[in-house]
Image (cartoon, helix red, strand yellow):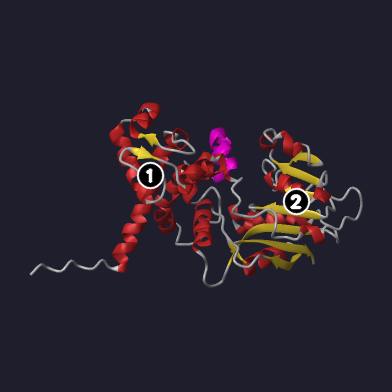
Amino acid sequence: MDSEVPAVSPAQLLMHESLGRIVTMTCLRSIIELRLYDLVPEAGTVSLTQLAKSSNASEEILIRLLRPLLASGIFASPRPREYIHTPGSIGFRQPAIRAAFLHGFDETLPCFLVQHRWLADNGWKSPELPDNCPFSMTHGGDSLFGHLEKNPEKAEVFNRDQEMEFIGIVGVYPFGQELKWSGPEDVLVDVGGGKGQASLALTKAYPELHRRVVLQDQAPVLKSVEHEVQAVVKEMRAYNFFDPQPVKGAAFYYLRRILCDWPDKACKIILQNQAEAMDSHSRLLIAAFVVPEVGCDFLTAASDAVMMTYAGKERTEAQFRQLLESVGLYLTKVWQTPGELQAVLEARLS
């Protein structure tokens, strides 16, 4: 009688799946380095021989790198030695998607390899200093933004990553019904708005915002803002959100994907600087993930784990409320579409 094949336990299955994801990511990193997303035609097939010739890689190494990706739905092989794009692979033609992966793999993934050591060395507490966290332990003592400042090419990848719309720009907060200008000089301030992707999307969706947006970020970032954005904003102003906010009494101060990068102490400084510029009609808008108290989805939980490596965090509504109240603001409403991850929190002066 044949011996029975032992069943795979749930723990073993989970281990294999987890290791499989690491294998997939590692092979995908090599494929991106070879630019196979461009070498495989958008429509139709390409032969292994042609891929090897175009990429200067051996046929054998391409076969071995592509095997785990094919099993994961990244590329497909309709016939032996032929390859086509799938929805899972063709997206990597988009610079923002490539940047999100590259920043995650090159800068963040190594931090997870030392996370347990950092936590053990620091009493198993959440990191509170950007220059003393798993990221700094991995990158020679530098904080995330210190590291990016020293490495402009990595900063460019990070800025591209910010174009990924995990946090929605339009469709969450009802700007159409909430825009109530008090005068011709009233504006929306896009605080730390990067290259203006949010400013552009908002002005396209809400024509009444045309020439009413002040785009703020560090001077080197603003130098690379495209003309399409420059044409729709009122002003581009170099600004560090750890300094006092120079635009006083704006209708809206809009922070998108900002606070998650920073620990509570830093967030209080950022929020205090905006609060001191606000008047009674001003509203502070925070576009962010809001972590549910129970039943957290995987993407939000994973995002918080990533933020922890930088000494940042994703926050619950209660944590946001506590932060706001500490600087004299109160949470008026949380706008969130059912079933969606992103939310916009609205706050006013107390």
Task: Tell me the quarter of the picture where residue 170 sits.
Answer: bottom right
- Residue 153 inside the magenta-drawn segment: yes
Q: Indicate which disc residue 205 carries.
A: 2
Instruction: Decide if residue 142 is in sight here.
Output: no
Nearer the observer, 181 or 137 = 181
- Rendered location of residue 302, percent (x, y): 49, 58
**Which region of the structure is painted magenta?**
144-160
Q: What element carries label 2?
A: helix
Nearer the observer, 124 or 151 = 151
CA neighbours of label 2 inside 10 A, class few (<14), some (14 to 19), many (20+): some
Nearer the observer, 224 or 148 = 224
Callout 2 touching callout 1 (CB < 8 Å)? no
- In this picture, residue 248 sits left or right of residue 305: right
Q: Indicate which disc residue 50 carries.
A: none
Q: Indicate which disc residue 26 carries.
A: 1
Q: Distance between the residues labelled 2 and 1?
A: 39 Å
Image point (79%, 42%), residue name: 233
Q: In this view, does 231 lie above or below 117?
A: above
